[in-house]
Amino acid sequence: MNTQLPTFNDLKDSALYTRPDRLVALLNKISDMGDNHLLAAAHAEITSPFRLRLLIETILRNENWFNKVLEESYYHENGFHKIVLLEGTLFKFRLHHFGSSAKIPMENIHDHRWPFASGVLYGRLHMSMFTTTGDEKISEKLLHYRYDSNKNNGSYGTDLIGSAYLKICEERIYHPGDNYFMDTHELHRITNSLGDESITAILTGKPIRRKCNLFAKRPITSSEKKPKKYSKEALSAMLRILAEKIYPMNN
């Protein structure tokens, strides 16, 4: 058995996607380099539809890896599914599935603890970009929270630190095959309409801080901060559906 750590070029080899342990080791190494261009290039390789389907099928066949995905994945209160396919000490690689519920996806405005590369695998993604201002006449007044993703107590942490004025500075629409990169300071919100389905794949980079900023129109309730977990049966069925949408094999 080859025990040598795979290199970036191995991301083009479909065999790597049947070995999630080796893929995790390589993505940890890439994330640790702190090179955003390399992170985006790695994302482009691992989101090849065929390779991604192969990875999902590998996870479905491997009880150990499936249980890891089950532990980290959940339905987000903002109206989408967050499926963590791979996780290392310095990165996460996950799918977001919007539009599969009766709830309109409407995230709170937020930035991130880490830079990340993302892209649309299925459907369209609508996104609003925001900037902070000091002028209440041209901006919306929102509650400003510090968001802590640590779930040691079973839910996320949010600390209200005051209020802030934000305004939309750009509207974006991404289509299948479109990729984009976001840095930690950028503020955004997904604004898909009811029935707009999309699947995106996100590869996070090396975290640069423990908390991020979150802006909301109203106080965030305790129930909203508690992840809604899946049963094994529900997650298995969802992964099979996502795999078929990403790389159809059934006619």
Image (cartoon, rainbow, N blue to C red):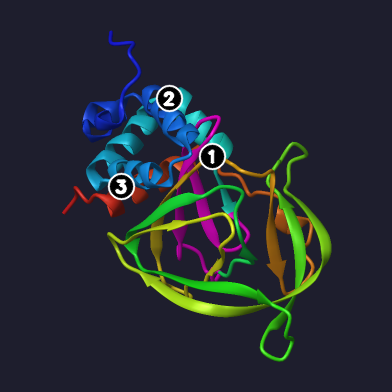
Q: Is residue 170 left or right of residue 155?
A: left
The one of 115 and 34 positioned closer to us in this rendering: 34
Q: Quick one: label 3, few (<14), some, or many (20+) residues within 10 Å?
A: some
Residue at (72% x, 85% y) in the render: 135
Q: Is residue 249 magenta?
A: no
Q: Are marks 2 and 1 in contact (CB under 8 Å)?
A: no
Query: Which quarter of the rendered picture does the C terminus lie within?
Result: bottom left
Query: Element at badge 2?
Result: helix
Q: Which residue is mark 2?
A: 25
Above or below residue 44? Residue 172 is below
Above or below residue 169? Residue 77 is above
Among numbered discs 3 and 1, the one appearing first in the sequence: 3
The one of 99 and 2 positioned closer to us in this rendering: 2
Give the amino acid at mark 1: Lys
Whole-angstrom CA distance, mark 3 to mark 1, is 17 Å
Query: Which quarter of the rendered picture does the N terminus lie within?
Result: top left
Whole-angstrom CA distance, mark 3 to mark 2, is 18 Å
Q: Quick one: label 1, few (<14), some, or many (20+) residues within 10 Å?
A: many
Q: Is residue 224 left or right of residue 32?
A: right
Q: Which residue is mark 1?
A: 206
Residue at (50% x, 39% y) in the render: 92
Whole-angstrom CA distance, mark 2 to mark 1, is 14 Å
Q: Which residue is mark 3?
A: 44
Q: Which stretch appears magenta?
A: 76-105
